[in-house]
Image: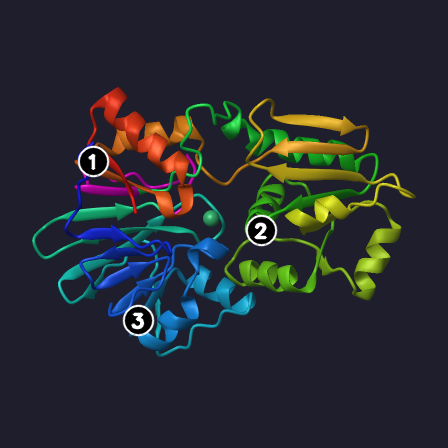
Amino acid sequence: MERFQCKQVSIDPTGAIVVADLLSVDGHHSGVIARATTHIHQDHIRGLKRSIRETAMHIASPLTHDLLSAYGHHVPYYRRVDASYGTKISIEGLYVKLLPANHVPGAAEVYIETNNGTSILYTGDFKLPGTEIVEGVDVLVIDATYGMPEWRRPWQQEMEYILPDLIDESLSKSPVHIYAYNGKIEEVVLLLRRMNVTAPIVVDKKRFKGLKTLERHGYKIGDVFYSSSREALEVKKDKWYIEFHGFYEWRRRNINGSKAIHMLLTGWEFRAPYTWLTSREIVVSFSDHADFTQLVDYVLETKPKLVITDASRGGTAARVFSEYLRQRYGIRAYAYP
Ligand SMILES: [Zn+2]
């Protein structure tokens, strides 16, 4: 296949999406004027320290900026450009605005118009519904983490109901320990509160700061305690609580000596919405990314002239997805870099 190089958009091997040599998104690129960050995940904040040193502006949603601070990545006020969803920012010949993305709290897509009228949309990470679709953009740069046709979760939207029910049901018997990545933990706390699951929540000190940041932004987080506090010890005596742990702590879960239920949240489970391993261990298919079906839906609804799939993060899946769009729908689609 002939390799096509879009003149205005490229993706660095480090993951920076570079637009017109003026703006880099989710990675550092030397010589640009502005850096934007779509959300707090590690693979989207690479090179942030360097961008803060070398780049005049750092654009992110106000919540993403505050969450970055809470997690130890402070953007100084003289670099920080808080962009609420929909607010237009001018960078030399570019107009830039952030649009809402359903991923982790604060997440955004980045919409750009160049001075020759080309429109570019970078999705960042997202799932549907809740992510804005801009019909007819010229260039769509899309996350394709789940770009393999077999990576489908037909129950994805129902998980908004299934997961809180599972947790509530488990809480009626014992405490619940949940293991998940950063960002997903915050997303699940907000989901539980929306669905009126009111049990006290125990987290480590860093995530506690993150949740308090969400509260300052108007989200309902209810009773939350950090694990070594006196209040947390009191709460744990009652046996009616949810404790969150990092994803990798699942391997060190201790199922001896207590009746607690241990729940792993992962997007890499395509067989069923959830699977009990034992009466106290459960793996739940819960992702903050679009699955293959949602990726295709998103592209078909956007009707872009050109699609670039992000292979710096999606790897082989991004290459397979661009190939699928070309073969199945005749859409001009290429994986970068
Ligand atoms: Zn992410």
- Which sits earlier in the primary sequence, circle 1 or circle 2? 2
Task: State the mark number for residue 304.
Answer: 1
Say whether residue 79 is left or right of residue 171: left
Say whether residue 161 is left or right of residue 59: right
Q: Is residue 263 above or below residue 337?
A: above
- Which sits earlier in the primary sequence, circle 3 or circle 2? 3
Q: Secondary structure at mark 2?
A: helix
Marks 3,1: beta carbons within 8 A: no
Q: How far across and down, in percent of the image, does residue 144 sit?
A: 38, 38
Task: State the mark number for residue 186.
Answer: 2
Q: Tell me how far mark 3 sits from mark 1, CA to CA.
A: 29 Å
Prevalent SS, magenta region = loop
Q: Nearer the viewer, mark 3 or mark 2?
A: 3
Q: Magenta stretch: residue 138 in it?
A: yes
Q: Is residue 87 visible?
A: yes
Q: Tell me how far mark 1 sits from mark 2, CA to CA.
A: 32 Å
